[in-house]
Amino acid sequence: MMGQRIAVLGAGPMGLAVAYQLALDGHEPVIFEADDRVGGMTATFDFNGLDIERYYHFHCTSDTAFLQLLQELNLADKMRWVETKMGYWYQDRLQPWGNPVALLKFKGLGLVAKVRYGLHAFLSVKRNDWKPLDHVEATGWIRRWVGKEAYEVLWRRLFDYKFYDYTDNLSAAWIWSRIRRIGRSRYSLFREQLGYLEGGSSTMLQGLADAIRKNGGEIRLKSPASKVVIENGEVRGVMAGGELHAFDKVVSTVPLPYVSRLMPDLPQPILDQFNNKKNIAVVCVIAKLKQAVTENFWLNINDPEMDIPGLVEYTNLRPLGEHVVYVPFYMPGEHPKYAEPDEVFLNKVKRYLKKINPSLLDSDFIDIRASRYRFAQPICQPGYLDEVPDAKLPVKGLWAADTSYYYPEDRGISESIGYGRDMARKVTQQ
């Protein structure tokens, strides 16, 4: 069988995985990427001499597709596993978090609430069947399990400062998968183990890009597709840089809100489905410090003076000499807060970190920056998959999916790789 010429839109982990699988199977993928680098949300930048991701990432032992890919790329020896700690900042004090003893000792919560919270988390990690939760609303589901007190103390702000107005219409299956993923990164009830890649995500991204090129694929950076050309119900190719590039098939992996602009000739009901999808935006502040803020990798936050549900002290997972902290501010892209200048967010972060660790001085801040991503996280309402078009669109040779397509799993590098490779195999079987 002759290899097919296939366009892949987007060079995030899913797009790279699609192209990698296509190239392995003897086809000729060409990736069109708007950015000047591969990686999407996993891309790295030069942070004052330190090459690091714009948005934090970590790996769990259950990240099968990711670990399998590392084996194939001969990068498995670059994986490092570290025992990490979690903390909770509540009522102006830093407390340990993330295991049964920490839960029982937690100050500011009654015993019954603790037991209910712990039971819910335990059963969520043990549960495998998400279907019964698919059409259930998440906050009601959690409240019924953990009760009002535990919800107010431990859950409410996680919802309010990530989803804002969308909080009351989220899928319980989707929230459950997030609880389970973190729970499954524990190798005992008392210990949590997370992983990082030597050199960060760029180690994998470069390995993938090299493998794509070596197997006959092509990656075109700073080359956004402007339109997918459809004639008589089948794909003709892709407009980019003002000209038509002919392809047998096109696979889009860009966020769903972009799809209707790229494919205006799709049937209207399908365009409406894409346009109805909402996304959370992120302003992610990254700070480089002379001293640690805490000893935790992950710090949950419930503080009336801080409009964040938590922060990630990345160097407590991956040592880098200096101390690096990520502080993500999530909000709907339509929210007025998203229009505020970077300075507002940078000043908040300095204030928050100094409150959590009063020994921090202004002179401890070596550098601080903000990155923004408009479509950082799809919002998955109950019954999400019933509402999205099939990845195989009703146009011959055309496919489209983004990170919400492996719902109820939360967006992640491993999930994107697994889904992308599966999709590539289906694209060429048709």
Image (cartoon, rainbow, N blue to C red):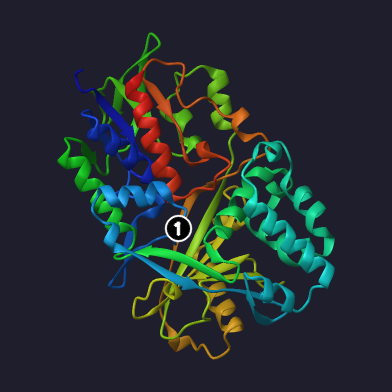
Residue 227 appears in the picture as rendered: no
Relative to the observer, which residue lies in front, 96 or 231?
96
**Residue farthest along the top direction in this orientation:** 232
Name the residue: 68% across, 47% down: 166
Residue 8 % position (x, y):
32, 33
Q: Which residue lies furthest to the front in this view?
A: 188
Say whether residue 223 is left or right of residue 388. Answer: left
311 or 102, nearer to the observer: 102
Residue under the image location 75 percent in, 53 percent down: 142
- Per the image, the residue denoted by label 1 is 61
Tell me if residue 266 comes above or below residue 208 in the rendering: above
The quarter of the displayed image where residue 1 is located: top left
Which amino acid type is shown beneath numbered disc 1? Thr
> For the image shown, how many numbered marks are present on the structure?
1
**Height in image: 24 above or below 311?**
above
Q: Between 219 and 196, which is closer to the camera in this rendering?
A: 196
Can you give x and y, in whole percent of width and height, for residue 350 in the image? 53, 78
Q: Is mark 1 on a helix, strand or loop?
A: loop
Q: On screen, 195 above or below 418?
A: below
Location of the C terminus by quadrant is top left
Residue 88, horizontal then vertical, whole percent: 64, 74
Q: In which quarter of the image is residue 153?
A: bottom right
For the question of whether residue 109 can be seen, the reply is: yes
Out of 412 and 276, give the one closest to the viewer.
412
**Residue 318: image location, x then y, percent:** 39, 71
- Kindly identify the residue that appears in the image at 53 percent across and 24 percent down: 271
